[in-house]
Amino acid sequence: MKDLAWIDLALTAARPQAMGALLRYFRDLDTAEEAFQEACLRAIRTWPDKGPPRDPTAWLIFVGRNSGVDQIRKTARNTALPDENVLSDLSDAEADMAERLDSSHYRDDILRLMFICCHPDLPATQQIALALRIVSGISVAQIARAFIVSESAMEQRITRAKARVAKAGLPFEAPSAAERAERLPPVMAMIYLVFNEGYSAGMSNPDVAALCEEAIRLARLLQRIFPAEPEIMGLAALMLLQHSRREARYDGEGQIILLEDQDRSLWDRRQIDEALALLDKAIRHRKPGPYQVQAAIAALHARAVTAGETDWKEIELLYQLLEKLSPSPVVSLNRVVAFSKLRGPVEALAMLEPLADALDGYFYFHGVRGALLAQTGETREAREAFGLAISLARSPAEAAHVRLELDKLKEEAILS
């Protein structure tokens, strides 16, 4: 077996389960990561000649465990022994750890690994960085490029996150069903944060844009662990629907193309079909959640053959439901956009006004307000709103898009 690409795919697929098992065995992120890396190195050296093992994950766990134990023993030789009475009371610790490793279900390992990476004590940026490094195995250099920071700064960020995790003293025993249910929301939130980092980057940074694919892979992994959880289906469907439009979101010069102006023939129908099937399955559970509702909104856009066929009435109703399930000013802003399609800019502006204080520092708020003001003919106010939006833009593409709107206003003023 000389196919090194296959080996890379096998190592990537096995990583979450193997890392989760090694983490439970060694109870230390650094030791587990080093053990897994050593196992990967041995796989790269031996698999091309001897062929792949029947169960690559089990092979990596076994080799990683032995490698880690060897390293611990080497370190122990340089460590002073405890008192004789302590030594005499020790049971067969190695056999006990092997039993813990071999008897636990893999889904608890993977869930624990994901949960540790999104520990509530960690800032969101550290959660994402730690998950990408530990769960996904993305190199520090790649993560640093994605976040546009130096490699040393990212290394420090991940190191600090690991230190916080170690200090928190998280339990390593198999979680109960109730604990697993409690852990799902932060795990899903972490995965969606990873996706949004990639989605918001657009075409400007390939290292960040690739995070969308990784987030979808993690959601599919979580879905295999919890095949009957509708919110996980909703999360996967939402990301697939959003990602299906990636080829149509920007023009050849990297300028943003709004959803209503996109060439829908460029949308990835395979991803859309997968997402719609997942969403239909989730809805049959009759347990609506925020991810399912967002996916349902995205699905209405995906099902519309043209922008003019979009069911804005149903979308506005779904945003009302989302306001109840997950109230936030951003959700209300999106509802205003849908409402404007039904009732026009004047009534939409009246709905927008109460959100001004909460969203004053938000790019999209001023962009939406500027567009609505432009539709009502209030050109001066529209220019001011667009100017604020440009100052708050998170990327050159966002700023360039608003500048185009400003240019249109100027051209209309000259023509009039």
Image (cartoon, rainbow, N blue to C red):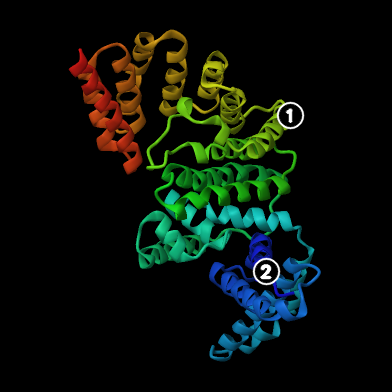
> Is 108 rendered above or below residue 319?
below
Which three-letter amino acid code belongs to the residue tagged 1? His
Q: Residue 18, located in which quarter of the rendered image?
A: bottom right
Q: Position of residue 79 (x, y in %)?
A: 54, 88
For label 2, the residue is 7
Q: Are discs 1 and 2 less than 8 Å apart at CB?
A: no
For label 1, the residue is 285
Query: Viewed as shown, does residue 328 lie left or right of 179?
Result: left
The C terminus sits in image quarter: top left
> Is 171 rendered above or below residue 350?
below
Q: Which residue is at a point 69% across and 64% down the rendered structure image?
A: 10
Q: Residue 35, located in which quarter of the rendered image?
A: bottom right
In this view, the residue farthest toward the right is 54
Q: Position of residue 385 (x, y in %)?
A: 25, 25
Q: Position of residue 19 (x, y in %)?
A: 63, 65
The N terminus sits in image quarter: bottom right
